[in-house]
Image (cartoon, rainbow, N blue to C red):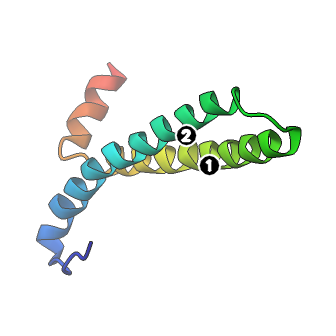
Amino acid sequence: MKHSIQSAGEAVPAAWDIICQMETPIWTMHDILTAIGLMVIEMEGDEAVSAVQRLVSIAQENFEKAEELRGQLFHLNHPRREELAKEASR
């Protein structure tokens, strides 16, 4: 997917849209990893099971990092960030 370079005034709304669009693919990866983790229970062969479990574990750790970063960008670029910060501090 290619995005054109935006002017400064357009950059924040464009970034906000991209951040919001990231949520579904990131959580789809989470669901796929969860399914693979459940399927591993039915696998045979200690080495194969260990290898798949390790891959799922690595991928889940990176999913968590990606979602945390997306969450930070979500809050930093939220169109009503100042308003929400004021409400949260009450």
Residue 13 position within the rendered picture, expressed as x and y whole percent measured from the top left:
15, 59
In the drawing, what numbered circle is on residue 31? Answer: none
Give the residue at x 23% y 54%.
16
Q: How many marks?
A: 2
Residue 78 position within the rendered picture, expressed as x and y whole percent measured from the top left:
25, 46
Name the outermost residue toward the front. Answer: 44
Q: Which residue is mark 1?
A: 59
Q: Secondary structure at mark 2?
A: helix
Circles 1 and 2, Cβ within 8 Å, touching? The answer is: yes
Amino acid at circle 2: Leu
Q: Secondary structure at mark 1?
A: helix
Horizontal relation, residue 15 to residue 33: left or right: left
Horizontal relation, residue 33 to residue 78: left or right: right
Name the outermost residue toward the top. Answer: 90
| Sequence-first disc among 1 and 2 | 2
Residue 54 position within the rendered picture, expressed as x and y whole percent measured from the top left:
76, 45
Q: Which residue is mark 2?
A: 33
Quadrant location of the N terminus?
bottom left
Name the residue nearer the viewer: 58 or 78.
58
